[in-house]
Amino acid sequence: MAKFEKFDAGNQIRGLAEAAAQIQIEELTRDGKMVSFDQVVAAIKTTRLEYRPRMLAARQKKSAESKREREKS
């Protein structure tokens, strides 16, 4: 008598979702619609160059405000 594995719907659905995602990736790559890793890295670099000074300034401002609040108490 053969042993059967217990059917796990979660694993089956996860496997199907991963397969569908892989198919979509392959289709986008084949059609030239998938951006390359280099393009993603370049976009991240551009975004960081633009927003990093703003984020640091906001962080310093928040830190200074927090320090003033502590001094009041």
Image (tube, rainbow, N blue to C red):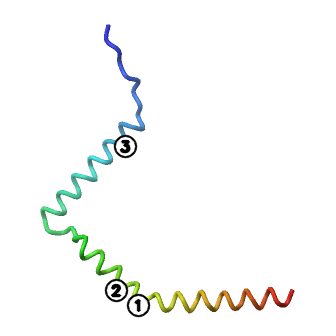
Does 35 sit left or right of 12 as displayed?
left
Is the C terminus in the top left, top right, bottom left or bottom right quadrant? Answer: bottom right
Label disc, if present, on residue 50 of the rendered structure: 1
Label disc, if present, on residue 46 of the rendered structure: 2
Q: Residues within 10 Å of mark 1 (few under 14, many from 20)?
A: few
Q: Secondary structure at mark 3?
A: helix
**In the rendered structure, are the residues bearing label 2 and label 3 in contact, judged by CB atoms less than 8 Å apart?**
no
Q: Secondary structure at mark 1?
A: helix
Q: CA distance from mark 2 to mark 1?
A: 6 Å
- The nearer-to-camera label among 2 and 3 is 2
x 25%, y 70%: residue: 37
The amino acid type found where label 3 is placed reads: Arg
| Residue pointed to by mark 3 | 14
Residue 34 position in % (x across, y down): 21, 67
x 45%, y 88%: residue: 51
x 31%, y 43%: residue: 16
The amino acid type found where label 2 is placed reads: Thr
In this rendering, is residue 8 above or below 50?
Answer: above
The amino acid type found where label 1 is placed reads: Glu
Q: Nearer the viewer, residue 20 or 54?
A: 54
Residue 17 position in % (x across, y down): 33, 47
- The nearer-to-camera label among 1 and 3 is 1
**In the rendered structure, are the residues bearing label 2 and label 1 in contact, judged by CB atoms less than 8 Å apart?**
yes
Q: Residue furthest right?
A: 73
Q: Earlier in the sequence, mark 2 or mark 3?
A: 3
Residue 29 falls in image quadrant: bottom left
Q: Nearer the viewer, residue 8 or 65?
A: 65
Does 38 sit left or right of 66 as displayed?
left
In this rendering, is residue 60 above or below 28?
Answer: below
Does 37 sit left or right of 63 as displayed?
left
Residue 61 position in % (x across, y down): 64, 92
Q: Earlier in the sequence, mark 1 or mark 3?
A: 3
